[in-house]
Each structure stands twice: as structure tokens, then as C-alpha cells.
Amino acid sequence: QVQLVESGGGLVQAGGSLTLSCAASGRTISRYVMGWLRQAPGKEREFVGAISWSGGYIRYADSVKGRFTISRDNAKNTVHLQMNSLKPEDTAVYYCAARRAEETFYDYWGQGTQVTVSS
């Protein structure tokens, strides 16, 4: 079992920055693909980005490409989401998730952290 806890959410003005962190426990995440997903009020959960276990491959949703950066530190069992140039439409609950590389769906989820971007 992997337990994930997100932190770093908050209220920020449009154009500002926030860094979200995801701390894992229970098992090393060094062999897991780590993803960030978000859900805005009244909308379905959507993919934000994901990073391979080695960090050598990172994929982003088009809506955040060039503004968000995912990184991981396997030694510290943490993953980060650096968010720059935030827009009001980035307002959502952000979730950290983990899955084995050979699987399609995420096995483990954090509780989420709220990000609110004011205009």
C-alpha cells in the first residue's frame, strides 16, 4: 500500500505561482509512475501531468504545458508540481496519484489539495 499526502495548495492571484508537494509513505514510489490530476467544481477529474519512475519521461496536458513542471525525488519519496502563470481556470482540487508502469489506471490517490486562482 502507498499512502499519498498532498500539500501546498492555497489562494493565489492570476499570474502567480504555487508549488504542490506529494509525500508518499508505506512503500517506495521509485518504481511508480506518479501523476497529478485535478477536478474543478462541476467538472470531471482531468489529467494534469505524469512523470515516469526514473523521471526521464514527463507528459503534460496541453492546458498546462509550458506553465507547470513535475519533478520527483525518489530518495525522499516525494513528487512536486510547480505551477507558474496560474489562471482562474486552474482552480481545482489537485490530486497526486501513483500507478505501476504496466498499469493504465492509478492505484493510489491522495486526498487532494485545493488551489484557488483569483482574477
Image (spheres, rainbow, N blue to C red):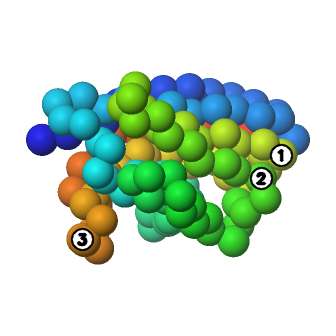
**Coordinates of residue 55 in the picture (x, y in percent):** 50, 52
Sequence order check, earlier mark of 2 and 1: 2
Q: Mark 1 — residue? A: 85
Q: Is residue 110 left or right of residue 95?
A: left
Q: Between 69 and 115, which is closer to the camera in this rendering?
A: 69
Amino acid type at image mark 3: Glu
Q: Nearer the viewer, mark 3 or mark 2?
A: 3
Q: CB of mark 2 within 8 Å of CB of mark 1?
A: yes
Q: Residue 89's quadrant in the figure?
A: bottom right
Q: CA distance from mark 1 to mark 3?
A: 32 Å
- Which residue sits at x=73%, y=63%? 65
Q: Assign the C terminus to one quadrant of the image.
A: top right
Please name the residue shown 54% across and 37% down the image: 80
Reading the image, the residue beneath label 3 is 103
The CA span between labels 3 and 2 is: 27 Å
Q: Which residue is mark 2?
A: 67
Residue 39 visible in this rendered orientation of the protein: no
Q: Quadrant of residue 78?
A: top left
